[in-house]
Image (spheres, rainbow, N blue to C red):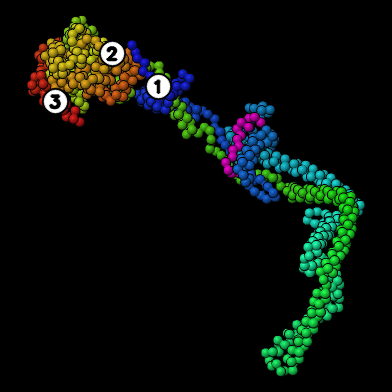
């Protein structure tokens, strides 16, 4: 039964389908490199064929020559020459002109200018298809973030290529200039017509505004907030006067009430005199108290004279004494003025004191009532005038609003007129200048060096194509043929040495050693391969005293290789023990007819130490130095038994008693027993049938050992025919001296040489040098 080993990552499953991972890609690439290495002849042949075809193409392909021109595209904006500022605008402009270069209208203009000798590429093309033929070989490209536009053309003649590029450039320049001039004329005519209409509208609106101003009247006041009519301003002033009259009337009424309250309560009436002076008026108060205007003027003059005399006296005092005539005169004048004022105040106080509370109160009350009456009359007059002014302002405010609206409309039209005049002036200045200016900075010139085909391009494409085709062929061969094609390929893909190649052995009837070729036919050619295997293991740099022998699949001949290798070791004088660890299908036990006898399973299940019970269960063969430990009775859990400590103890005991210990295990892909035992021995030998085993299964079997930390000593290619295909031929002549005609002396001499090393060591224990080497290796 062939097992199915799935190493796919579960996380790479989506809706039941497998997705490749990075590790799978790397593994596949490495696998392809390995097979390409050993099938390099196919890739080399593909490269040679591709290079030959490339050389033929290079020799026979027509030569094409290219000529190119470079244009500088400049855009004018706001009456100034400026490169396109923003990157997006630059890209759009350059992309537009790139498409324009190869447009049919430009190409047709170039065809009209093209000379007959420059139409070499159009000779075999009908005239109706000339534009398409020319566009096929014409190209335009731009350099990012620059204003350069490159125009190139390929032709079979260098002069024709330069002529076509020159014609295309001239056609492009003419198209741009003609398109702009037509557009500028149309724009100018439209703007002029619009300006005339706006001017007519401005004149009409200004005339209407003037007539309406005459209707409304010109006596208007302009402020920051707009126009104020005189009627409106008058109403505002009357409103302010009415408010002030109301406040004055209310103040008189409050004082009258306060005075009446003071008179009813018998309070001091004279305290109200100061307040009445501000409300009823100063002149009325003085008249009520008997004070005339002349008296007040006289008092004021006397006070002024007194102040001047005091100032003069103060200025003379520092220089003159009191007896000085001027000082005495001034002092006398000051005393006389002060005496007059004192007498006047005394007389005024007497007049004020002559008024009693009964006379002063009614007098003040009468004065306040008169003032209140006058204030009400004044308030009514102002209110009446305000009502009339407000009504008139309401009637005339609509005209003011309409006047403002008409003025705003005239201003808007005048502004529109100015904008149109500016635009027309700008167009006039730029009438002869296109907004896009194209300047030729590199003239098209003939180039005698062909651009197609190029030798380096043909060479690179040939090598690349040949390599790809060869790699594809190698991959297809690898997919269709899933077997190793040669020993070298096997060693390369498995990364382990090939220890021996064993041809197909004819089966021998019987049991025990009678069925072993190395024992029954020691001089046969096919048995020499097992001696080669023995020599490779003995001369290996790695310790190989305890060896596991397994295969990828059942039927690969692992048991045959195990018993023949064991006999070969015994013939070389090495005490050898063969352990049948295939507890599921024990082939070694069946070969020696030991079924039903106690063996390895009993050792692993016993309570006694392996060193005590194992010697009792050994099968002694006809060869003195070869013993076999059968598998024993079949057990349900062989993997658990082999992974226990007792099997390790058994190997340790066997190592002390034997020079070589061979463990025959089940196929590695069928069960995990071989991987368990592989970690306990020095190394493993994988038996492969190249004509039977699939390559991927053998690779997986070898990887299963390395994944568990086991060492793979090498591969044994088994079951090869005498003239096998695929590089495994076995006809390299092992029968150079082992024919049937060889005499017995030569045979005995050969065996004496092989057994001679064991004569230096005690029987049953192996040579001391071998045991010392094993101990050193274990320590390392």
Q: Residues within 10 Å of mark 3 (few under 14, many from 20)?
A: some
The residue indicated by pointer 1 is 8
- Residue bearing mark 2: 556
Query: Along the line of sight, which residue is nearer the eye, 191 or 386?
Result: 386
Classify 179 as above or below 265: above
Q: CA separation, marks 3 and 2?
A: 33 Å
The residue at the point 73 percent across, 85 percent down is 310
Residue 146 magenta? yes
**Label 3 belongs to which residue?**
771
For marks 1 and 3, the one nearer the N-term is 1
Looking at the image, which is closer to me, 467 or 418?
Answer: 418
Q: Earlier in the sequence, mark 3 or mark 2?
A: 2
Whether residue 221 can be seen here: no
Stretch of the chain drawn in magenta: 131-147
Residue at the spot 56% in from the left edge and 39% down from the top edge = 447
Residue 461: image location, x then y, percent: 47, 30
**Which tag is nearer the camera, tag 1 or tag 3?**
1
**Residue 97, position as x, y percentages in the image:** 65, 39
Would residue 360 appear left or right of 143 to someone viewing this image?
Answer: right
């Amino acid at each position: 039964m062939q097992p199915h080993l799935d190493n796919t990552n579960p996380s790479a499953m989506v809706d039941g389908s497998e997705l490749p991972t990075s590790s799978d890609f790397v593994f596949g690439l490495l696998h392809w490199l390995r097979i390409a290495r050993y099938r390099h002849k196919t890739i080399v042949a593909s490269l040679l064929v591709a290079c030959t075809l490339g050389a033929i193409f290079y020799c026979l392909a027509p030569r094409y020559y290219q000529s190119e021109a470079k244009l500088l595209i400049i855009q004018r904006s706001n009456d100034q020459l400026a490169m396109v500022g923003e990157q997006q605008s630059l890209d759009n402009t350059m992309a537009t002109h790139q498409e324009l270069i190869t447009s049919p209208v430009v190409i047709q203009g170039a065809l009209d200018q093209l000379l007959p000798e420059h139409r070499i590429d159009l000779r075999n093309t009908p005239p109706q298809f000339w534009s398409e033929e020319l566009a096929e070989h014409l190209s335009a490209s731009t350099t990012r973030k620059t204003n350069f536009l490159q125009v190139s053309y390929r032709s079979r003649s260098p002069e024709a290529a330069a002529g076509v590029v020159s014609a295309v450039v001239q056609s492009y320049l003419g198209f741009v200039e003609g398109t702009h001039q037509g557009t500028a004329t149309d724009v100018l005519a439209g703007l002029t017509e619009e300006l005339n209409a706006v001017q007519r509208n401005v004149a009409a609106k200004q005339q209407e505004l003037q007539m309406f101003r005459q209707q409304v009247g010109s006596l208007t006041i302009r402020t920051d907030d707009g126009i104020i009519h005189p009627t409106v301003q008058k109403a505002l002033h009357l409103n302010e006067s009415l408010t002030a009259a109301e406040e004055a009337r209310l103040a008189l009424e409050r004082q009258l009430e306060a005075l009446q309250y003071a008179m009813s309560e018998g309070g001091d009436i004279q305290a109200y005199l100061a307040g009445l002076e501000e409300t009823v008026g100063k002149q009325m108060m003085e008249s009520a108290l008997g004070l005339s205007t002349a008296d007040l003027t006289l008092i004021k003059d006397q006070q002024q004279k007194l102040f001047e005399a005091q100032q003069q006296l103060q200025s003379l005092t520092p220089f003159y004494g009191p007896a000085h005539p001027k000082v005495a005169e001034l002092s006398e004048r000051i005393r006389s003025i002060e005496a007059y004022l004192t007498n006047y105040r005394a007389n005024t106080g007497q007049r004020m004191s002559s008024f009693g509370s009964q006379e002063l109160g009614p007098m003040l009350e009468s004065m306040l009532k008169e003032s209140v009456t006058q204030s009400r009359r004044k308030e009514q007059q102002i209110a009446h005038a305000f009502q009339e002014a407000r009504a008139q302002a309401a009637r005339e405010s609509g005209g003011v609003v309409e006047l403002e609206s008409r003025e705003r409309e005239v201003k808007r039209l005048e502004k529109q007129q100015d904008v149109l005049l500016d635009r027309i002036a700008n167009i006039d200045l730029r009438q002869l200048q296109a907004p896009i200016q194209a300047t030729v900075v590199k003239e098209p010139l003939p180039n005698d060096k062909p651009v197609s085909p190029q030798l380096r391009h043909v060479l690179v494409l040939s090598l690349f194509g040949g390599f790809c085709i060869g790699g594809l062929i190698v991959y297809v061969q690898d997919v269709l043929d899933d077997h190793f094609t040669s020993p070298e390929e096997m060693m390369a893909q498995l990364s382990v040495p090939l220890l021996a190649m064993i041809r197909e052995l004819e089966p021998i009837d019987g049991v025990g050693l009678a069925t072993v070729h190395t024992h029954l036919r020691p001089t046969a050619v096919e048995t020499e391969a097992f001696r080669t295997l023995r020599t490779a293991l003995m001369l290996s740099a790695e310790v190989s005293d305890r060896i596991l022998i397994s295969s990828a699949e059942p039927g690969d001949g692992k048991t045959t290789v195990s018993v023949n290798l064991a006999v070969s070791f015994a013939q070389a004088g090495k005490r050898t023990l063969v352990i049948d660890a295939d507890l599921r299908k024990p082939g070694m036990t069946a070969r020696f007819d030991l079924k039903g006898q106690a063996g390895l399973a009993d050792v692993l299940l016993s309570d006694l130490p392996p060193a005590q019970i194992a010697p009792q269960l050994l099968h002694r063969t006809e060869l003195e130095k070869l013993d076999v430990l059968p598998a024993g009775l079949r057990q349900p859990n062989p993997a658990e038994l082999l992974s226990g400590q007792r099997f390790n103890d058994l190997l340790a005991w066997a190592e002390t008693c034997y020079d070589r210990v061979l463990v025959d295990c089940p196929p590695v892909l069928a069960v995990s027993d071989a991987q368990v035992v592989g970690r306990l021995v020095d190394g493993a030998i994988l038996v492969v049938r190249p004509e039977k085993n699939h390559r991927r299964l053998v690779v997986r079997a070898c990887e299963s050992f390395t994944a568990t930390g086991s060492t793979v000593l090498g591969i044994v290619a088994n079951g090869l025919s005498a003239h096998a295909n695929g590089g495994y031929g076995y006809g390299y002549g092992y029968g150079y001296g082992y024919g049937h005609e060889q005499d017995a002396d030569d045979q005995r001499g050969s065996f004496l040489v092989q057994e001679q090393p064991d004569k230096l060591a005690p029987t049953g224990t192996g040579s001391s040098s071998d045991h010392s080497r094993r101990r050193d290796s274990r320590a390392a």
